[in-house]
Structure formats: C-alpha cells, structure tokens
C-alpha cells in the first residue's frame, strides 16, 4: 500500500515505537532485495480481493478458535438433527391424518414448527461463524435509519464537541 503512494521516503512514522521499523527500512534500502525476489510472487497484490474473501470469517477466525469451531460443529449437528425431525414429522403426518387423531396432528404441527425454528437459528449461527456477509454492513457504517450505530468521530472532533 505504501509502495503505491510513492515509497517509504514519503511515509512518516511519528512515534518512537517505530524505531525498529525505520531501522529495518534503512537496512533494506541499503542491502537491496533478497536473492529470491525475482522468483517471488505476491498473489494478493496482483488481484483485488472480493467482498466475500475479505469477510471470510471461517478461515480468518473460526478455524483457529476452539470455542467458535465447537459452536460451528454444534450448529451443523443441530441442523442435521432438526432436518431429520422435520422429515420424520412429514413421514408420520399421513398416518395421523388417516387415523383422524387431530390432537396428535396438532402436536406434530407444533413440534415441526419448533424444529423448523431451531434449524433456522442454527443456520444463522453457522452463517455468522463462517462469513461476515450476514450482518453487512456493520451498524457503524449503515446509513441513517434503523440499525444505525452512533456517529463515529475523530479525536479532534471529540475534543471540539
């Protein structure tokens, strides 16, 4: 990014914490590129990443986090269990209708509705753990209206107001 703006000479690092970065850049500028650099390719620099690649939460976080990967496995497991429950409700419905057991049919209908809602919730958890597209744009970047976060201001604006 800095290379595209005109090089390191125009980039200012104002803090003392950047002393090692400055020293490394001075050394790198004197020593030159490493011997393997003509063969090295930067695949990320050659192409612009898509929104899905930038918001890929699964590879960036969920695969590495023990609690999130466990939650993802549980969400997938719950979805398959609820899918089986819904299919069994569909399979039993004709037999219950043939017996004209209306209370049982009503209970089956309520159970299937509950299974469907649980499956939807587990699907939402799965989507939330695998991609950032479910809640995009985030509340701080939404236009005015429902779901908009508070206005973000710079430090200077906060001091003035």
Image (spheres, helix red, strand yellow):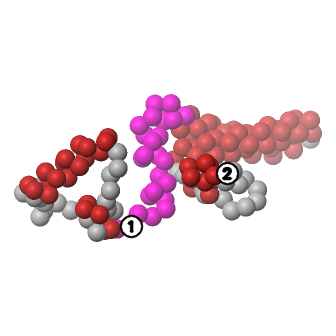
Classified by dominant secondary structure, the portion drawn in magenta counts as helix
Q: Residue at x 28, y 69 (%)?
A: 6
Image x and y of residue 99, in percent: 89, 39
Q: Residue at x 66, y 39 (%)?
A: 82
Compared across the picture, whether 146 is left or right of 46 comes to right
Q: How many C-alpha atoms fall within 10 Å of the one at disc 2: few (<14), some, or many (≥20)?
A: few
Compared across the picture, whether 64 is left or right of 9 comes to right
Look at the image and give the residue range highlighted in magenta: 43-71
Determine if the magenta segment contains residue 69.
Answer: yes
Q: Residue at x 55, y 34 (%)?
A: 71
Helix, strand, or loop for circle 1? loop
Question: Which disc is residue 48 wearing?
Answer: 1
Q: Earlier in the sequence, mark 1 or mark 2?
A: 1
Helix, strand, or loop for circle 2? loop
Q: Nearer the viewer, residue 73 or 137?
A: 137
The quadrant of the rendering that contains the N terminus is: bottom left
Image x and y of residue 53, in percent: 44, 58
Q: How many C-alpha atoms fall within 10 Å of the one at disc 1: few (<14), some, or many (≥20)?
A: few
Tell me the residue that label 2 is attached to: 161
Compared across the picture, whether 20 is left or right of 148 comes to left
Image x and y of residue 161, in percent: 67, 51
Displayed quadrant of residue 102: top right
């Amino acid at each position: 990014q800095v290379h595209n703006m005109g090089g390191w000479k125009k980039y200012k690092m104002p803090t003392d914490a950047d002393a090692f970065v400055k020293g490394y850049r001075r050394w790198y500028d004197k020593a030159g590129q490493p011997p393997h650099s003509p063969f090295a390719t930067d695949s990320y620099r050659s192409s612009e990443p898509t929104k899905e690649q930038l918001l890929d939460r699964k590879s960036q976080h969920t695969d590495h986090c023990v609690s999130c990967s466990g939650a993802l496995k549980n969400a997938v497991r719950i979805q398959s269990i609820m899918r089986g429950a819904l299919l069994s409700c569909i399979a039993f419905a004709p037999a219950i209708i043939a017996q004209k057991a209306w209370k049982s049919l009503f209970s089956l209908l309520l159970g299937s509705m509950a299974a469907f809602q649980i499956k939807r919730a587990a699907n939402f958890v799965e989507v939330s753990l695998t991609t950032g597209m479910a809640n995009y744009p985030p509340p701080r970047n939404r236009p005015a209206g429902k779901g908009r976060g508070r206005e973000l201001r710079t430090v200077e604006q906060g001091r003035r107001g």
